[in-house]
Amino acid sequence: MYDPDVILSVERRTIAAGPRTLSYLSAGTVSSGRTVVFLHAFPLHAEMWEPQLRAVSEGWAALAPDFRGFGASTPDGAGAARGDASLEDYAADVVALLDALGVRRAALCGCSMGGYAALSVLRRFPGRVNALLLADTRATADSDAAKTSRAAMLDLLDREGPHAVAAEMRPKLVGATSRSERPDVLAAIDSLMGRATARGIGFAIARMVTRPDATEALAAFRGPVCVVVGAEDTLTPPAEAASMAAMVPGAALVTIPRAGHLSNLEAPDAFNAAMHDWLAAVSGASA
């Protein structure tokens, strides 16, 4: 059940993840089977999920980790190399967080890169996932054109730093409506991107470009699945979202009007409505 009059408080906490510190946001009382983990987009951090963290359904708790080198999480160590990085590193961090909090299974909600990470958790640790909400993302591996684009972004990062990457990403992350009518959303995105480190960005790009195709794992999954996409998303457009939803019998597909790639920030009320329906389905499946 969703109670619009209940707004949860959000706290920032940390755990040790090997030699690094993993920072995360927490709302509600964490428990196994009734915890949803929000995984953020590139190159933002966990606070992009505040509109959802404060509005999760009654009886649910929410977690949102910062990936390595984003937000307040420390980056990969000095001895690590981009060429050795894998999305499974993010998956391992998510599971380390669940283990630290005593959560056996969780629902995963990922946007863009966060969707890739959610699918990586599903591939590597299928028993830890009881539901998926995949927002403005894809299950396929990078195309050759996408790999070329990511290589160019790595070059830009190495030449000009994180601010140049943020400037290039900014117009792609939102839809035309937000660019023309929602300066507050653009300001929030600028602030979120400002916390990304050069090392975090570089390793994230390396992880995305080498990620494997996840369609087989997604098609085999039988927990509640919801696919959400902004109608104005040009990075992972609605047609691709529809194809992804069609892979899973019974998956819900929600297209949010007047929103782009960060639909949860551009249209939080519509996104939250889809989230509440999904969590209701998860609760029903586990009853």
Image (cartoon, helix red, strand yellow):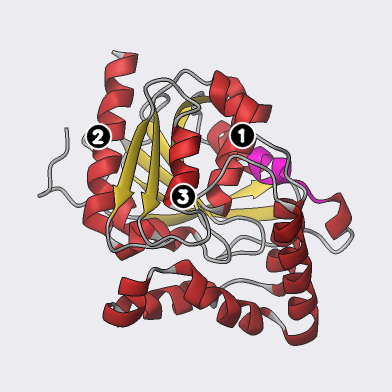
Which mark is in front, 2 or 1?
2
* Amino acid type, callout 2: Asp
Q: Residue furthest front?
A: 239
Q: Earlier in the sequence, mark 3 or mark 2?
A: 3
Task: Name the kind of residue labelled 3 in the image.
Answer: Ala
**Helix, strand or loop at mark 3:** strand
Sooner in the amino-acid sequence: mark 1 or mark 3: 3
Q: Is residue 282 above or below residue 4?
A: above
**Residue 274 seen in the figure:** yes
Q: Which mark is residue 277?
A: 2
- Other-residue count near label 2 (Cα within 10 Å), few / some / many at <14 / 14–19 / ≥20: some
The amino acid beneath tag 1 is: Val
Residue 201 quadrant: bottom right
Q: In the displayed structure, would residue 87 be above or below residue 156?
A: above
Say left or right for 44 vs 262: right
What secondary structure characterizes most of the magenta part? helix
Q: Which residue is mark 1?
A: 121
Which stretch did the figure color magenta? 85-92
Q: Measuring 48% from the left and 76% from the top, which residue is drawn there?
A: 171
Report the residue marked by disc 3. 64
Residue reaching furthest top?
A: 287
